[in-house]
Amino acid sequence: MGVEIQVTDLTKSFGKQLIWGDVTLTIPAGEICVMLGPSGTGKSVFLKTLIGLLKPDRGSVIIEGVDIATCPEKQLYEIRKLFGVLFQDGAMFGSMTLYDNVAFPLREHTKKHESEIRDIVMEKMELVGLLGAEDKLPGEISGGMRKRAGLARALVLDPEIVLCDEPDSGLDPVRTSFLNQLIVDLNAQIDATFLIVTHDINTARSVPDNIGLLYHKHLAMFGPREMLLSSEEPVVRQFLNAQKVGPIGMSEEKDADELEAEKDQDLPPLPPIPLQLEPSNGIPRRSQRAPGEWCRTHGVEPPPGSFEPNMTMATGA
Ligand SMILES: Nc1ncnc2c1ncn2[C@@H]1O[C@H](COP(=O)(O)OP(=O)(O)OP(=O)(O)O)[C@@H](O)[C@H]1O
Ligand SMILES: [Mg+2]
């Protein structure tokens, strides 16, 4: 059913450079979250801190009752087995075939026989649509295929938590749509908790249950997708609607003159909240929140169609 990650007052600096401070949020078990933020705001650093690859200055990351920010290495090693991670650069071994890359965590972390490893690798390769490409080297395939191979490798240990750092960067819009569908389908099938870092606003608007936005060294907002998509908070509004008007400038923050100049500009009305992407036909409905639930309880215009009778399936009813 996935595992919850509870982050409290997390603060990280490198030397004197504060990356972000006092980040507090709970990533709910089994749900899909997207983390957004301008380039350089520390999204990748955040993911690495969640798996204990980087140590925070202070604060805690509680997973299954263990604070991975302070626990001993041995305990951290055990907790890490809950994670499947797709790093931003793919982190594939260039001299190994896709098969060996995907098999690597199984050979490293389990005592499974090669025949069993083969079954798991082929199952995951099929899941990400890469059957037939097992013998290729990472350098011989497209960027999109490398991302999918990275995802296959992130899944081989049946993770409870899947972290993906820009799984869609460099992909064309059609492949991004397929990848988004794959993430929603995987979440419905394996019930793991997903945290995805992306710059793709369409992904952020339609895939997750929750969205977070890192900006200016802090977590500007974190909450249900519908809450952020209907937010009038200037930074959140600007980022989620890809607008030029707002506090974020080319070099992260606009100066006072720039902000003064756009003071009287009218903002376009917020676009409607899109319906959340559903799992493909034949895949069980997701057991998380009912679509539009947050809207219903907060008096916000719900996504079109989200209360039609056939949608109640998504609640498990
Ligand atoms: N190991 C490190 N040592 C020192 N500084 C680091 C280290 N890793 C990251 N940083 C710095 O932390 C800041 C945040 O980096 P990070 O890679 O997390 O940004 P990001 O939000 O993921 O950006 P992008 O969207 O471009 O991927 C940057 O200023 C970066 O230079
Ligand atoms: Mg990054």
Image: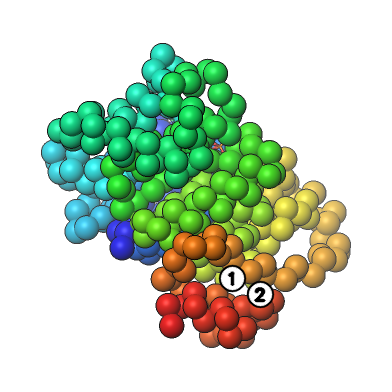
State which mark lies toward you, 2 or 1.
Answer: 2
Residue nearest the observer in this picture, 311 or 192: 311
Find numbered disc 1 in the image and state the secondary structure of the residue it sits on. helix
On the image, which quarter does residue 70 sit in? top left
Q: Are marks 2 and 1 in contact (CB under 8 Å)?
A: yes
On the image, which quarter does residue 307 sit in? bottom right
Residue nearest the observer in this picture, 263 or 181: 181
Residues packed near mark 2 inside 10 Å, few (<14), some (14 to 19) or many (20 plus)? some
Identified at 34% across, 51% down, the residue is 161
Residue nearest the observer in this picture, 236 or 315: 315
**Which residue is labeled 1 in the image?**
226
How far separated are the C-alphas under marks 2 and 1? 9 Å
Q: Position of residue 159 (x, y in %)?
A: 31, 48
Residues packed near mark 1 inside 10 Å, few (<14), some (14 to 19) or many (20 plus)? many
Identified at 68% across, 38% down, the residue is 172
Q: Quadrant of the N terminus?
A: bottom left
The amino acid sitting under disc 1 is Glu
Q: Position of residue 134 (x, y in %)?
A: 43, 26
Q: Position of residue 82 (x, y in %)?
A: 27, 48
Identified at 54% across, 60% down, the residue is 280
Residue 12 appears in view: no
* First of labels 2, 1 by sequence position: 1
> What is the number of callouts on the image?
2
**Which residue is labeled 2 in the image?**
303
The amino acid sitting under disc 2 is Pro
From what the image shows, is residue 1 above or below residue 36?
A: below
Residue nearest the observer in this picture, 280 or 163: 280
**179 with respect to 96 (left or right):** right
Q: What is the residue that sits farthest to the top in this orientation?
A: 95
